[in-house]
Amino acid sequence: MSRSSRAWSISGAVLAAVTASVCCIGPLLLLGLGVSGAWIGTLAVLEPIRPLFSVLALGFLGFAFYRAYRRPAAEECAAGSDCARAGSRRFTRVTLWGVTVAVLGLLAFPYAAPHLFASAASEYARTESTQVVLVVEKMHCETCPVTVAVSLKKIPGVVDAQVTMDPPEASVYYDPKQTNLDELIEATTTAGYPSSKRPWARKNEDWVHRPDFERRFEEAGVSGVFLALRTDLLPPSAL
């Protein structure tokens, strides 16, 4: 395998893998580096072509392995050439395997990120905090909810943040003495994912902070009360 073909096949695999994953890894990486701005959300335009570049990356790797492990013709291994030196062939293969691990890691990261960054807050901490549900925009891949959750959890006073793709929402538990709704919205927006408070609960969901509040009314035979109540009109003592 000549140096030029080795270089362009390996470089092509790395470049294709980076392009395939930048829409998912980019926002999370920039957030970790302290870089913020609504413009980060524009990286999502690469999401539709992620499968194409994933295939290209694997194709480049396949070609590189073929060239690295095939038995070259005698005329291709002239004295002094790369394939004529055992050390050169060994270096090529070691490099190729190292690049393969990196490329596969980039391609797999969007699917592994939700599990790698998963965390759970105690039920007690959630119960003693205020909950708000945000409708989040521009989430297109598996890593987007992770980035949104990380941006929210960095705010002092946020106890927990559970973010989902379907529906595109963030359920945030926070201490109102330390932070507020505006700061939560600003955090997701500067991470590249604009958000707003969900104005109404969907069917069969609570309109209040405590998950057992509606159940108390239903047990008392007053389940229809939620047609006339809004969360922000209920006094804290009622919760």
Image (cartoon, helix red, strand yellow):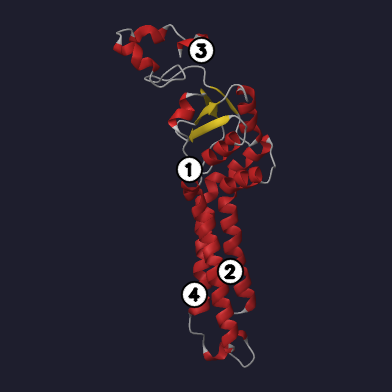
Please report whichever mark, 3 or 4, sits nearer to the chain's N-terminal start: 4
Q: Give how far across and how far down residue 179 sits, in percent.
A: 62, 25
In space, the residues marked 1 and 4 are separated at their CA atoms by 39 Å
Left/right placement of residue 22 relative to residue 115 reads right
Which residue is label 3 attached to? 236
- Upstream in sequence: badge 1 or badge 4: 4
Closer to the eye: label 2 or 3: 3
The residue that disc 2 covers is: 9
Q: Give the label, 1 or 4, closer to the camera.
A: 1
Q: Earlier in the sequence, mark 1 or mark 3?
A: 1
Above or below 209: residue 144: below
Q: Amino acid at mark 1?
A: Ala
**Residue beneath the point at 57% across and 77% down:** 92
Task: Tell me if mark 2 has few (under 14), some (14-19) or many (20+) residues whose alpha carbon lies within 10 angstroms of its own.
Answer: many
Q: Position of residue 199 (x, y in %)?
A: 52, 17
Q: Of tags 3 and 4, which is closer to the observer?
A: 3
Dots 2 and 4: beta carbons under 8 Å? no
User: From what the image shows, is residue 95 above or below residue 114?
Assistant: below
Find the distance from the CA under tag 3 to the CA under tag 4.
68 Å
Tag 1's secondary structure? loop
Where residue 43 sits in the image (x, y, percent)?
62, 43
Disc 1 to disc 2, C-alpha distance: 36 Å
The numbered mark, 1 or 2, whose residue comes first in the sequence reads 2
Q: CA distance from mark 2 to mark 3?
A: 63 Å
Circles 3 and 4 in contact, beta carbons < 8 Å: no
> Please, what is the three-letter code of the amino acid marked with disc 3?
Pro
**CB-based contact (under 8 Å), mark 2 and mark 3:** no
- Label 4 is placed on what type of residue? Tyr
Q: Which mark is residue 118?
A: 1
Q: Amino acid at mark 2?
A: Ser
